[in-house]
Image (spheres, rainbow, N blue to C red):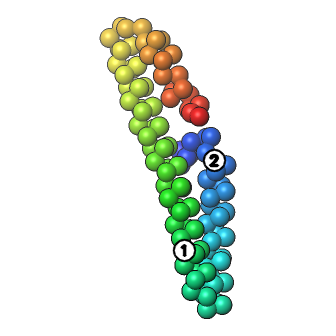
Amino acid sequence: MTKSVLTKDLHKKQILDEFLQYCEQKQVEALQNHDPYQFCTWIKEARLARRELAALYRAKEQYDEEHTRIRGIVHRLRSIGVNADVVERVHYITLSEEVS
């Protein structure tokens, strides 16, 4: 199974997952306390956290697409006898997943 986020974002994903669980817990507490304001506040916080998480997933998808495309180009160049080392050096960051 492939990772759902970039390696550099694993810690942020873990924090967001924990925060989402906390938000759900606070929403339940707000409902039990009949506090609609707090309930709405925690819904908004959870929504923002989900957006950040979705952005991390999109970044990983973009990385995967670029990585696959570059690997395909390198493979095609090598299959016709062209030295593709320059392409690999230029795209080293994308190919090694060391994105900052």
**Count of numbered labels shown in the rendering:** 2
Q: Which quadrant, please, contains the C terminus?
A: top right
Mark linked to residue 87: none
Q: Nearer the viewer, residue 49 or 84?
A: 49
Amino acid at the residue labelled 1: Ile
Disc 2 to disc 1: CB gap under 8 Å: no
Q: Nearer the viewer, residue 56 or 65?
A: 56
Q: Nearer the viewer, residue 58 or 4?
A: 58
Residue, x 41% and y 26% (percent of image)? 70
Q: Quadrant of residue 26?
A: bottom right
Q: Residues within 10 Å of mark 2 (few under 14, many from 20)?
A: some
Mark linked to residue 43: 1
Residue, x 48% and y 17% (percent of image)? 90
- Left or right: 69 with respect to 3? left
Q: CA distance from mark 2 to mark 1?
A: 24 Å
Residue, x 67% and y 63% (percent of image)? 18
Q: Nearer the viewer, residue 28 or 30?
A: 30
Q: In the rendered image, which residue does mark 2 sit on?
A: 10
Image: 25 above or below 91: below
Dot 2 or dot 1, earlier in sequence: 2
Amino acid at the residue labelled 2: Leu
Helix, strand or loop at label 2? It is helix
